[in-house]
Image (cartoon, helix red, strand yellow):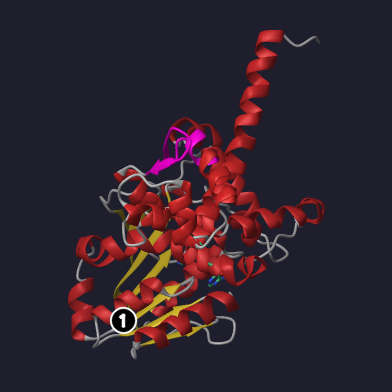
Amino acid sequence: MTPDPEKLGLFAFRVFTKLEGAVTSGMIHLGDQLGLYRALAEAGSPCTTADLAAVTGLDERWVREWAYNQGAAQIIHLDGDEALSMSPEAVAVLASPDHPSFGMGMFHRLPQTMAALEEMPEAFRTGLGLNYDSHGREGAVGVERSFEPWNRANLLPVVLPALEGVETALEAGALALDVGCGAGGAALLLASRFPASRVVGYDISRFALERARERQTEQQVANVEFFDPRTVPLPTDGSAAFITTFDCLHDMTDPAAMARAIRAALAESGTWLLVEIKAQDTYAENVARNPMASLMYGISVLSCMSSGLSEPGGAGLGTLGLSAAKVDQLAQAAGFSRCRQLDIDHAVNAFYELRP
Ligand SMILES: C[S@@+](CC[C@H](N)C(=O)[O-])C[C@H]1O[C@@H](n2cnc3c(N)ncnc32)[C@H](O)[C@@H]1O
């Protein structure tokens, strides 16, 4: 079969746009890590590469070449050869950690995510993946920076009021658990907002637990603790009024067992807030409805599915592995009789209220 010359050119272009994206992603990582976006946003009006190099303490020639990449990729604006500026939207996504659209978390952990490539040939041969600790401390910080900006802006004012009776129970004082808590952001938010309640975060990643405890000390929040559930298991006496799982059930090697453990920990009147990636039932539907499907399947190989296969016999659901129908099945099998999807607008996540 001889390739059609015109189609060949277009196909090769498509393949190389992926490499362009990967390399520009590396440059976005540098822009974040070196403080270039923050400095440019603070500069306000257009500044030169020399100005930017001076305020960041970096070498002008390197800053200029980085800026040419960023200008050519239309991430920042370059007027002529040297005058740099950012649109308000670029400032929100690249330089505003408190903005719900801040997007530097996934770029923060790009080196660790890509380093997983070295382990992948072995994983493809053996079937065994790697858990989140294989991404080291910076992997945990990257996850923290990925999910928290939206949570900080929306968890307390938008998500909690959408759940029946949860705020009242936590105001009065109750036990709340955050399973797969990562660096502890949600647990710390809940504990600070509801001082009469006790919050326990669980994660199997030592780097995530270290980071969570570090932040607890920094923020001086007394009513929260963090544990590895393999050494300090979830309670089995129905003592928890509220349990949350944020973007982590699909990463677990045995999500069905975790759903049963959550059911055993939860009071009859309790609520499980299950936050998962918005997924469809099939590959074809995911590709048709999700413009980021290829990114998500790739992250799944390098991170989510790998984590879900990090023990022999792991479920390996992967990033797009828990559709609404599968959430429903999993919840019913674990003893939950009510499952309601909340009407919350999020680019990536779906929110479910599960009750016994
Ligand atoms: C994508 S991160 C989400 C972290 C956090 N919920 C957040 O939103 O920032 C998934 C987390 O699930 C944790 N995890 C995976 N399997 C687990 C298990 N069996 N029990 C508890 N945590 C687990 C990982 O270590 C990782 O920290």
- On the image, the x and y values in percent for residue 317 come to 58, 53
- On the image, the x and y values in percent for residue 305 come to 62, 54
Horizontally, is 50 left or right of 169 in the view?
right
- Relative to the observer, which residue lies in front, 113 or 29? 29
Horizontally, is 81 left or right of 218 in the view?
right
Which residue occupies 37% across, 82% down? 238
Asked whether residue 330 is in view, the answer is: no
Indicate yes or no whether the magenta region holds residue 107.
no
Task: State which quarter of the image contains the C terminus.
Answer: bottom left
The furthest residue to the bottom: 222
Which residue occupies 36% across, 44% down? 86
- On the image, the x and y values in percent for residue 245 come to 42, 66
Q: Quadrant of residue 207?
A: bottom right
Q: Residues within 10 Å of mark 1 (few under 14, many from 20)?
A: many
Residue that label 1 marks: 191
Magenta residues (range): 69-85
| Circle count | 1
Which residue occupies 49% across, 51% down? 322
